[in-house]
Structure formats: structure tokens, C-alpha cells
Amino acid sequence: MDLNELIEIKEKERNSAKPIKLRCCLAAGCISSGGQSIKENLELAVKAAGMEDQVEVIGVGCMGLCSEGPLVQVDPDGILYEKVKPEDAPSIVAALKGDEADIKKGDIHHPFFTKQVPIVLENSGKVDPEKIETYIASDGYFALQKALNEMKPATVVDEVTKSGLRGRGGAGYPTGLKWGMVAKTQAERKYVVCNADEGDPGAFMDRSVLESDPHRVLEGMAIAGYAVGASQGYVYVRGEYPLAISRLQTAIRQARKYGLLGSGIFETSFDFRVDLRIGAGAFVCGEETALMASIEGRRGTPRPRPPFPAESGLWHSPTLINNVETFANIPVIIRKGAEWFSSIGTERSKGTKVFALAGKVKNTGLIEVPMGTPLRVIVEEMAGGVPGGGKVKAVQTGGPSGGCIPYSKLDTPVDYESLSQIGSIMGSGGMIVMDDTNNMVDVARFFMEFCMDESCGKCIPCRAGTVQIYRILTKIREGHGTEKDIMKLQDLCEMVKTCSLCGLGQSAPNPVLSTLRYYREEYMEFIKRNVSLNGNGHKTK
């Protein structure tokens, strides 16, 4: 394939488009609520109304507002129907002729939509994830063509570096610096790995991107392969994501068919192949060295670093590892330029961030906001606050590795440095909102139980430390704790944080430490209850 052929596919797809589109959400959440039946009924209703020449029914990925799904959007009118049922299809089609559909309509002018800046999600809810032509019609694979024919590998690395993009997997390591290290390492064989082992409770960002726009991730990986000198890529995705896996497999087949993956891409000497590796659900395999061990067919446990994967990764070869969202940013950076991307966000945190909003808020779902957006804007304006007029108590960012941010800190901008200063992390993008009915000792105990169960057991600080922290939290929660237990808890957390081998253990105490920092009085309430129950003010041992 060459540039002219790519343009021809784009123009053909756009010219064949019908004037009215009914976009039906077929992401996992909407499918579980009848999305597939809704799409089929819409197609039947369009046929029955004799509107096949005017109306096209398209199955798309996530539209974002998951709490109101299943969703159907009418373009170009911009009408959004919420909580659609299969039997609503005839009413939706009749409304195209002027009738009024008795179906709940969403407000597309709500801050949930208007305050978003879609970069990673620019195609989500718009393109058919199982049809490569719709991705090409949205400028898909033009960035890969530009990189291969107009840029040298070093130029691509420089562009990513200038953009200021940082890894969206949690640590925020500069992407361009990582790419540069792999590119400079001399080796006969190199690899590119996409980490799609998303395991945080309440997180569904990577799953949604893979379900909604899989070609975007493949294009980003291919550009990375060209930039660092790799010819083989792997997507490591957890087995609990069957829809994402299915759509990735379809996307890979389609890209190979068009010559966008494989040998001699865009009539150049660049070869790049992508294969899938399915994980068995171990949270620790989100850590890059454990992930590589799993790809190699070994038990997924971390190893000490150095050497870093950029020097010695898969099968002792230089390996570039980024997560789904990081790769999904690459095509637009190459297409629009580093200067455009770096104009969004803050001085040290460029671009946007995708978050999975969950918990005690009216509007849950997937959002993408510029770095530096205050938490208050996300939680109270976009998410609509707590249902029933309740008050936000805390916001958990970063999943089991993050911290609980109190209401008093809601004006904190969402960027790497600001979240770190208040005891949390960006993480991969999970954001869980809690209200006054949540007890923070229970929250800390829940996340510690998760980390304890998911510990691979390789290093003693994590294997034994998480168990002891969980036991002390349980002791306090059951009313048998003392003030000494809080001191032990603090010391144990610091030890696990300092001495654990990998990021799982090093960050596991964060929820406990943040709740001790901001909600110590809730721990003391259980201890005071213990004192009063034992009479005479004597504390139990």
C-alpha cells in the first residue's frame, strides 16, 4: 500500500457514508445491557421504514457516559438517547421523520461532555472498531505513513520527546527518553510491548480503548517499532477482556490484509508484526519485568533492575514497554506535531489523561481531560457530584497503588507532581469517589486485602508485610486495636514501601498511609470504642 491507496480508501469510505448515522454503543458495558439487540432492532426498523438509503446503523465503541447506557447517538443532529431498550428502536427511527421519541435524552452540553478534550478517545464512539476503513476515514494510519516516508527513526524519537508525553501506565516516565534508550541500544533483535494488563479495581480505560479503537494502538506500536528499530510487537492483554481480545485479533488481521502490518509496510523496508499474548489475570503481571516473564512462558514474577528492559528485556533483547494509552497518543503526536500536543496540559505534565470515573457520583464512565484539570471540576461538575445531594468524602486515584484524597484537597490539579505531593499517584487512571457513608479504615483494608492476595510472594517485605498490615487493619476494624497498633501500622507501611522488590509492593501501603494522614480520627474511633468496651479506661493488649 502507498499514500494514494490510503487516500483512496479514506475518500471511498467518506463518500459512501449516508446522511444520517445511528451510532449504537457496543462496548462491553452496553452489550451486557442489550446493546447488540438494540443495533439489530435499529437495522430492522430502518428497513421497515424504507430509509436504508438515508440511514446507516453503526456499532461503535464506548461513548463515555456508562451510567446511562445503553446509548444511541443520532448524527448529524447530535441527539443522544440514554438507557435505550431494544423495543425503543422503532421510536428512534420514527423520530428521524419528525415524531417525538418517548426515550430519555442526554444533555450533550453537560460539563461531562463539554470539558473533555478527546485525543486518545477522539474516535471512541465514532468509528466501527471492527471495520478498518472507518479508522482510515478518520485519518488512521496516516501518521504511520508520514513517519515511514517523511521522517527518520531518530526524528520520530525527537518528536515524541519534544511532545513531553509521559508514560500513562502510572509512573509517568518520559516516553521519548525511554524510546531513545531502546533506539540507541545495539542489538540484532528488539521488541515493542503494549502493556494491556489492566488490573486495578474500578479501572477500565485500556479495555475501553482496545474495544473502541484498536487500530489506534496498533498504529502507535508500529510507529514505535520504526523509531526504535524493532520488527516484532506483542500486546499483553488479560484474559478477562474477551471483547477487547476479539477486536484486537480482527484489527490485526485487517491491518495485515491492507499491508499496514507485516513486511514492507508502505513500500518501505520496514517490517513489523504484532501478536497477542493473553494473561491469566495476575495483577503483578502489570509490572514490566513480570509481564515479560509471562510472555516468555515463565511464571510472572518481577526481577531486580538493572538491567532495565531497554537494555535487556524479552529474551535478553532490548524491549520497549508502554501501556495502551501511551501508544494511543502517538499517532496524533506524529500527525499534528509535538508543539500542538505540548500546548495542552501543564508545564511538566503534557497532554490529556483518560480516567475511569466510578463510585458515588451521578455520572460514571470514561472521560479525557487536560492534565492540570482540578479534581473538583471532574468530581463535582463533570461527574455531577454525589447522588441525592450527599457530600464527597474522598477520591481514590491510582487504584490499589494510589491514595485517598480528602474533600479539602479537591482543588488539587490532576498532574503527576500535584497528586504525589498529597500522597497519591496518577496511576493508570482509575478514579473512585466516596461519600460520607464510606469508612476509610474499611477502604484501606479493602485495598490491602487486594494487594495481599495479588502479591507474587517473591520478596519477603511484600509477601509478609502486606499480610501483617491487613491483620492489624482487621484488628482495629473489629474493635481490638490500640494506639500502638497505629504506630506499628505506620512503621510496617514504610518498611514495605521502602524494601519491596517491585512497584506493587512499593506502592501497596499508599491507601493505608493516605488514610492515616487524612482520616486518623476514624482509626481512633475504633480504638476508643475498644477502650470503652473494656471498662476502667484500661487498654487491651
Image (cartoon, rainbow, N blue to C red):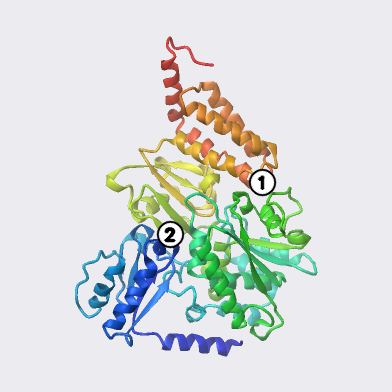
In the displayed structure, 51 sits above or below 119; it is: below
The residue wearing badge 2 is 366
Residue at 63% in and 77% down: 261
Residue 502 placement, left or right of 189: left
Residue at 35% in and 50% down: 361
What percent of the width, then of the height, locates residue 406? 43, 40
Question: Can residue 427 be spotted in the picture?
Answer: yes
> Element type at marker 1?
loop
Question: Could you say which is closer to the camera, residue 21 or residue 143?
Answer: 21
> Which one is earlier in the sequence, the residue at label 1 or at label 2?
2
Kindly indicate the quadrant of the structure image that contains residue 484. top right
In the displayed structure, 25 sits above or below 256; it is: above
What percent of the width, then of the height, locates residue 420? 54, 45
Residue 310 placement, left or right of 58: right
Image quarter (top left, top right, bottom left or bottom right) of the N terminus:
bottom right
Amino acid type for the residue under numbered disc 1: Cys
> Element type at marker 2?
strand
In the displayed structure, 511 sits above or below 168; it is: above
- Seen as rendered, the residue at the extreme top is 536
The residue wearing badge 1 is 502
Residue at 64% in and 84% down: 266
